[in-house]
Protein backbone atom coordinates (compact mmCIF):
# COMPACT_ATOMS: atom_id res chain seq x y z
CA UNK A 1 0.00 0.00 0.00
CA UNK A 2 1.01 3.59 -0.60
CA UNK A 3 0.05 6.81 1.20
CA UNK A 4 -3.58 7.53 0.38
CA UNK A 5 -4.32 3.82 -0.12
CA UNK A 6 -7.49 2.52 1.50
CA UNK A 7 -8.43 -0.97 2.63
CA UNK A 8 -11.19 -2.68 4.55
CA UNK A 9 -9.94 -4.96 7.31
CA UNK A 10 -12.30 -7.72 8.40
CA UNK A 11 -11.47 -9.49 11.66
CA UNK A 12 -13.57 -12.58 12.38
CA UNK A 13 -14.87 -13.15 15.92
CA UNK A 14 -12.32 -15.87 16.66
CA UNK A 15 -9.50 -13.37 16.12
CA UNK A 16 -11.26 -10.34 17.63
CA UNK A 17 -12.64 -10.38 21.16
CA UNK A 18 -13.27 -14.12 21.43
CA UNK A 19 -15.82 -15.79 23.67
CA UNK A 20 -14.89 -13.69 26.68
CA UNK A 21 -15.52 -10.28 25.07
CA UNK A 22 -17.73 -8.23 27.38
CA UNK A 23 -20.98 -7.55 25.54
CA UNK A 24 -19.38 -7.86 22.14
CA UNK A 25 -18.33 -11.50 21.93
CA UNK A 26 -18.87 -13.31 18.64
CA UNK A 27 -18.87 -10.09 16.59
CA UNK A 28 -16.99 -9.48 13.36
CA UNK A 29 -14.91 -6.30 13.39
CA UNK A 30 -14.71 -4.20 10.23
CA UNK A 31 -12.22 -1.35 9.94
CA UNK A 32 -11.88 1.07 7.03
CA UNK A 33 -8.30 2.29 7.03
CA UNK A 34 -6.28 4.79 5.01
CA UNK A 35 -2.49 4.97 4.94
CA UNK A 36 -1.54 8.53 5.81
CA UNK A 37 2.25 8.21 5.92
CA UNK A 38 4.91 5.55 5.61
CA UNK A 39 7.99 5.76 7.79
CA UNK A 40 11.06 3.58 7.77
CA UNK A 41 11.45 1.63 10.95
CA UNK A 42 13.56 -1.21 12.24
CA UNK A 43 13.29 -4.25 10.04
CA UNK A 44 12.60 -7.62 11.62
CA UNK A 45 14.67 -9.90 9.43
CA UNK A 46 13.85 -12.90 11.58
CA UNK A 47 10.11 -12.55 10.97
CA UNK A 48 10.59 -12.20 7.25
CA UNK A 49 12.77 -15.30 7.05
CA UNK A 50 10.25 -17.21 9.14
CA UNK A 51 7.48 -16.36 6.66
CA UNK A 52 9.58 -16.80 3.48
CA UNK A 53 9.41 -20.58 3.55
CA UNK A 54 10.81 -21.16 0.05
CA UNK A 55 13.76 -18.74 0.56
CA UNK A 56 13.09 -16.68 -2.57
CA UNK A 57 13.18 -13.36 -0.64
CA UNK A 58 9.56 -12.66 -1.62
CA UNK A 59 6.33 -13.22 0.29
CA UNK A 60 3.72 -14.94 -1.83
CA UNK A 61 0.30 -16.41 -1.12
CA UNK A 62 2.05 -19.79 -0.95
CA UNK A 63 4.16 -18.44 1.91
CA UNK A 64 1.58 -16.51 3.94
CA UNK A 65 -1.78 -17.10 2.26
CA UNK A 66 -4.52 -19.16 3.88
CA UNK A 67 -3.09 -22.31 2.34
CA UNK A 68 0.45 -21.29 3.27
CA UNK A 69 2.29 -23.30 5.86
CA UNK A 70 3.24 -20.27 7.97
CA UNK A 71 -0.37 -19.07 8.21
CA UNK A 72 -1.64 -22.54 9.08
CA UNK A 73 0.97 -22.88 11.81
CA UNK A 74 0.09 -19.49 13.28
CA UNK A 75 -3.66 -20.21 13.35
CA UNK A 76 -3.10 -23.60 14.95
CA UNK A 77 -0.64 -22.14 17.47
CA UNK A 78 -3.41 -19.80 18.65
CA UNK A 79 -6.07 -22.53 18.65
CA UNK A 80 -8.03 -21.47 15.54
CA UNK A 81 -8.96 -23.65 12.55
CA UNK A 82 -6.47 -23.19 9.71
CA UNK A 83 -9.06 -23.82 7.00
CA UNK A 84 -11.60 -21.18 8.06
CA UNK A 85 -12.93 -19.58 4.85
CA UNK A 86 -13.19 -16.16 6.50
CA UNK A 87 -9.41 -16.07 6.67
CA UNK A 88 -9.21 -16.37 2.87
CA UNK A 89 -10.71 -12.90 2.54
CA UNK A 90 -8.05 -11.49 4.86
CA UNK A 91 -5.15 -12.51 2.62
CA UNK A 92 -6.68 -11.50 -0.72
CA UNK A 93 -5.35 -8.43 -2.48
Image (spheres, rainbow, N blue to C red):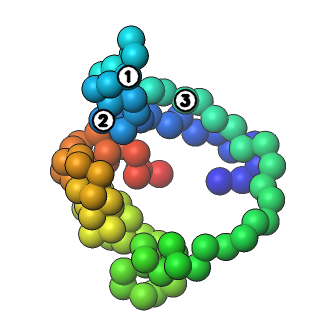
Mark pair 2, 3: CA separation = 16 Å
Residue 51: image location, x then y, percent: 42, 73
Furthest toward the top, the residue is 23
What residue is shown at x 32% (from left), y 25% (from top)? 20
Residue 26: image location, x then y, percent: 30, 22
In the image, 90: left or right of 33?
A: left
Q: Which residue is at the front of the view, 64 or 41?
A: 41
- Of callouts 1 and 2, the N-terminal one: 2
- Of callouts 3 and 1, the N-terminal one: 1
Q: Which residue is at the front of the view, 60 or 42?
A: 42
What residue is shown at x 69% (from left), y 38% (from top)? 34
Residue 19 in view of the camera: yes
Q: Callout 1: helix, strand or loop?
A: loop
- Residue picked out by circle 2: 14
Mark pair 1, 2: CA separation = 11 Å
Q: Which mark lies nearer to you, 1 or 2? A: 1
Q: Callout 3: helix, strand or loop?
A: strand
What residue is shown at x 34% (from left), y 20% (from top)? 25
**Callout 2: few (<14), some (14-19), or many (20+) C-alpha neighbours within 10 Å?**
some
Q: Is 53 above or below relative to 88? A: below
Q: Is 45 above or below relative to 25? A: below
Mark pair 3, 1: CA separation = 18 Å
Q: Callout 2: helix, strand or loop?
A: helix
Q: Is 43 above or below relative to 92? A: below
- Residue picked out by circle 1: 21
- Residue picked out by circle 3: 31
Amino acid sequence: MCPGGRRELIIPPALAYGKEGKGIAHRTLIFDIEIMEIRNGPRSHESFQEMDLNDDWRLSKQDVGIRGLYTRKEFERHGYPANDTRHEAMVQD
